[in-house]
Image (cartoon, rainbow, N blue to C red):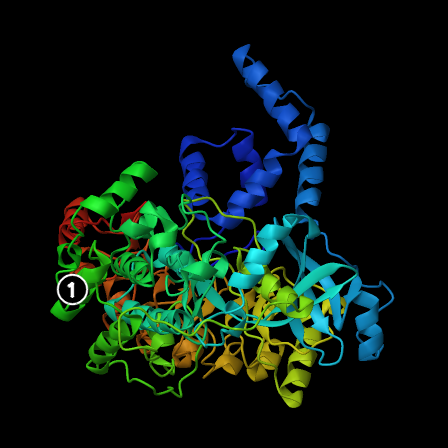
Amino acid sequence: MYFKNDFFFGPFMQKCISDSQIIHYLRNELDELENQHVKDHLNHCAICQKRTEAYSEDKELKTWQECQQRHNQSGHSDQNPFSEQQLDRIYNSTISSINQPPSTAYSPSPHTSSSHHIPVDEELNRITIRVVGNYHLIEKIGQGGMGVVYQAIHARLKKQVVLKLLLNNQWDNDTQTQRFYREMELIGQLDHPNIVKATDAGEVDETCFLVMEYLSGHDLKTILKSENRLSITSACYIVRQAANGLQYIHNHNLIHRDIKPSNLFLTLEGEVKILDLGLAGLSQANPHLSDLTDSQCIMGSVHYMAPEQAHSVKSIDHRADIYSLGCTFYKLLTGQAPFKQQTQIATILAHREETPPQLSDLLPEIPEKLEELFQSMMKKDPVDRIQTMAEVVEILDQFLSEQNEIPLNESAETCLSESQELIELCRNTILTPPIEVMSADASTQVQPSTRYVNSKRISLFLTLILLFSLGTWVAWWYQPPAPEQVADLPPTVMPVKEPSPEQAKMEREAAAWLLNHQCEIIIDGRYEPVTQVQELPVVDFYIREIKFHPQTITREVMAPLKGLAKLETLHLEDCHVMDDALAPLEGKLTLKTLDLHETGLTNAGLSHISSLLNLTHLSLQKNREITDEGLQALANLKKLSSINLDRLNITDEGITFIKHNPRLDWLNIKDTQISDTSIPLLIKLNRMKNLYLEGSKITDQGIQKIKNAYAGRDPIKY
């Protein structure tokens, strides 16, 4: 969750490039060093990529570029094709167009103010674009091939939901629809904590709609883009939950057919949800009921597809899901698919003919029992595989129970705010009881249903469940697809657990105060910052992120933050922070990200953050008043994964605190007095992925020593 044009925290934790830098980059006016800096930043910053794409669509800027190219070719590169006044107009018009807030379905009334109380129902009616049954559609948040997705509020419960209006033209084939009704009867009966749920469905004006629960977190494909691979215990926890949900599905005589990382979702509570039942079909226990799919059709994803699934989708049983989960297990542990060839056909053939890789080849520390489990899940012949998901769960439970760091079936009392610390999510998860196989043999079976699907209402409900699961469930946090090279996690959708009346009042009062004091905030269910009191929603909310615009920050200014229950991110960059200003933050365990870039912070001010025990990202860049002594306050912050110390007046003595921060994987000590003396400390950071040393006192020999210590990967960045 980021603010436009501002410093953001992620795997790289650098300040975003400015608007003027983007303009000059597109005009090819930067020197070689600055040009390379912008290119490198764009390679990993999705936010700036989108900003640059938007700028590049400006017609006047394109005209300017064409004129500039012609002048360069004619030898007049020192002359501008436009006057300074024209350039200013182009620049300002481009800035204005980019800074416009995204279009919304409604605009707050200019006459509304925080001091004028509007009844909840009246306010709800004012911002409603359409009413569908009991739901007020507030804002369009996405659109796909199957329909349009809206943020909505239940009229009576005043609860935020996500509502999808389905497009009528998707089901013109009556025969196909009836087949679908017949095969989806069992799907409507699924109710398990590890399977995503629909909460309501209906039909209004011949338009079908489906209401879904909110989820909070990320799918595993997204997580892997950021983490590359997961720890052994995290991967086991995730696969264990997925296997338990799949056993439940198999007990209902269904096969998922498309298990892969993008179809497994990890919530902020550490719970895995199985997504996208769009390819799900009945198992061979009832072959006469399964005629929706074409026997010649290949369904699934080739990197995770069982050998028999590529041959015929109608000849598979639940053991195809076991193979796919095995492929997913390998991906989670190693960051690679087990079989990945240059073409899809070659990949399919590899699944069929090549021996599965050994986990120990990439993970020498992998326990033997997990290697055996993986190899059993990956057998070419379904008969040779481990036969049920229940057996997978049993083996993983045995392994996890032996891991002292993860107590099973216990909910920790510590704050659940570390969404990027997967092991913390897993530790705080209460595992669902293992699902038993419904029959003694390998093929899970249930008695065929004798009910005939002749009720339009039942058929409609089942239709909606499948339609929504066809890859469109994620519209509740819809955003355009990011370029492949971007590794940043997308903005996290916030939990929807409603605050108590007292807490809700405190959050709303704090929001109003902050918005009236040059701040932007991000609250539950919103991706764009709220900048005006009139934009605050009718329903209760938590404040998750705050950005202060440049101003003097005193203790009084920060006082309202003390009572915020879910504050995770705080931006104070370019503000002037007084020594006692951070005192209200002391002990705030929800805070994970803190940007104090160029704030004039001193040792006295820094001392107040030593109790932020769940802090993971911290920037102290350009605070030259901070000394070696002041940095020792960071020794208490054992969850820090990234620290920016660029251009601090510190020596080797200053960074001795990092021996207490084993999770560090990002460290910037550019333009400091750090020397070769600190190399023994730096090479002990075995998680280090990004180490910035340029301008420090570390010699070329020292840099080579660091590279040698990280054999196989070079963490040093420039």
Residues 453 and 695: in front is: 453
Residue 123 placement: quadrant: bottom right
- At 14% from the left and 70% from the top, the residue drawn is 369
Residue 383 placement: quadrant: bottom left
Answer left or right for 692 relative to 220. Answer: left
Residues 52 and 455: in front is: 455
How many badges with numbers are in the image?
Answer: 1
Residues 520 and 230: in front is: 230
Q: Tell me residue 603's x, y (percent).
A: 40, 73
Decide if residue 530 is in sight here: no
Residues 62 and 275: in front is: 275
- Most distant residue in the right direction: 111
- Most distant residue in the top direction: 74
- At 62% from the left and 86% from the top, the residue drawn is 503
| Above-or-below relation of 377 to 560 | above
Please state which amino acid type lies under the numbered disc 1: Glu
Q: Tell me residue 8's x, y (percent).
A: 49, 57
Answer left or right for 5 relative to 329. Answer: right
Q: Tell me residue 697's x, y (percent).
A: 24, 51
| Above-or-below relation of 158 to 77 | below
The residue that mark 1 highlights is 371
Answer left or right for 167 relative to 619. Answer: right
